[in-house]
Amino acid sequence: MLVITGVLSALMATFVDLKPVVDQNFFFSTNDPGIQQTKEIERRFPSQPEVILAVSSRDISSPRYLGRIQKLTQRVHTIRAVSAVKSLAEGPKSFEDALKSPFWSRLLIAHDRKSSNVIVFMKGRHTEKTIQRLEQIVHELDARDFRIHIAGPPYVVEMLRRSLAHDFRYFSLTAVVLFGLTMAALFRSARLFVGMLCTCTSAVLLTLLLQSMLGHKIGILTVNLGTIVFVIALSHLVYMTFNWQTLADRAHRMGKEAPDLAAAARRMTFPPSFWSMVCASLGFASLLTDLVVCSAQSWHSLARI
């Protein structure tokens, strides 16, 4: 089992991308009419992803504020993946010109004139490193009277991706530590502990490999898949180990020799484990159906709006 687990780990490290993916299919299916219309619009009118920096201050017309806006604009321009930046320092001729212009006033200045926007246009669709660099600049320039808030689809997608990556790492680690230590304390056997850990880990690795072979990425429905598979596999191992111990104790009390306790334990465990698997599969199928229905209802609600 140690060799099998090692081989599967090597295969997964070579062929499987464990980086969570968040795209346009995060909430809606590719077959959704709304998504298809959106893709058609993007095909006819291609656009670049954009991020908006809302910068608030007590007086956005002061030379100090406008100087900071210019510095922020220049720093954002240094990011390689940024194609263009529009702000009070780049676009309108001056702050007064931005106020008089219907276009610039609506695009850059808030209604209460307590903040202005810095609009960042990016190249390509992979904006992870660009968002990280943008966050670094915002952290360096953010001040008490110069508050910078980030918004926009690329930023939201990056936050979701980070949340999924966090859950994927910590839920998986918690499952291995918590349930592994429980099994070690329950059976008090290093051999059983290592065997169970290798078997459950192999089940998780095989699941991730199969998912990758089918062309699926780590997403909202699969980020905790490893934890689920680990726990389910462990529960059946617990049943089989308990049955094995029961048969061994029974044979010992009766003074008989059991030729193959492992095979007897497998035969005893298979029927309930099989029907447990069927029930779990039906449960996940119903969950998937609920998600599809909720997605359709959300799209129709948005269409009415």
Image: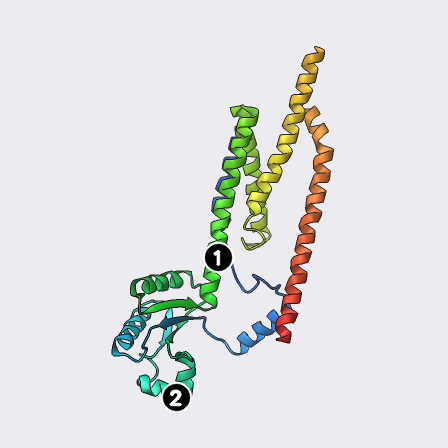
The three-letter amino acid code for the residue at tag 1 is: Arg
Q: What percent of the width, then of the height, locates residue 156?
A: 47, 63
Residue 186 position by quadrant = top right
In the image, which disc is placed on residue 226?
Answer: none
For the point 71% across and 48% down, which residue is it? 282
x then y, percent, for residue 247: 69, 20
Residue 19 seen in the figure: no
Q: Alpha-carbon neighbours of circle 2 within 10 Å: few (<14), some, or many (≥20)?
A: few
Residue 61: give x, y in percent of width and height.
Answer: 30, 80
**Do the numbered discs 2 and 1 sit on residues whose CB atoms are within 8 Å?**
no
The residue depicted at 70 percent of the width and 24 percent of the height is 264
Q: Is residue 125 above or below residue 241?
A: below
Q: Is residue 35 left or right of residue 81?
A: right
Which residue is the site of mark 1?
Answer: 161
Q: Quadrant of residue 253?
A: top right
Q: Residue 262: image x %, image y %?
A: 66, 24
* Residue for badge 2: 101
Q: Secondary structure at mark 1?
A: helix
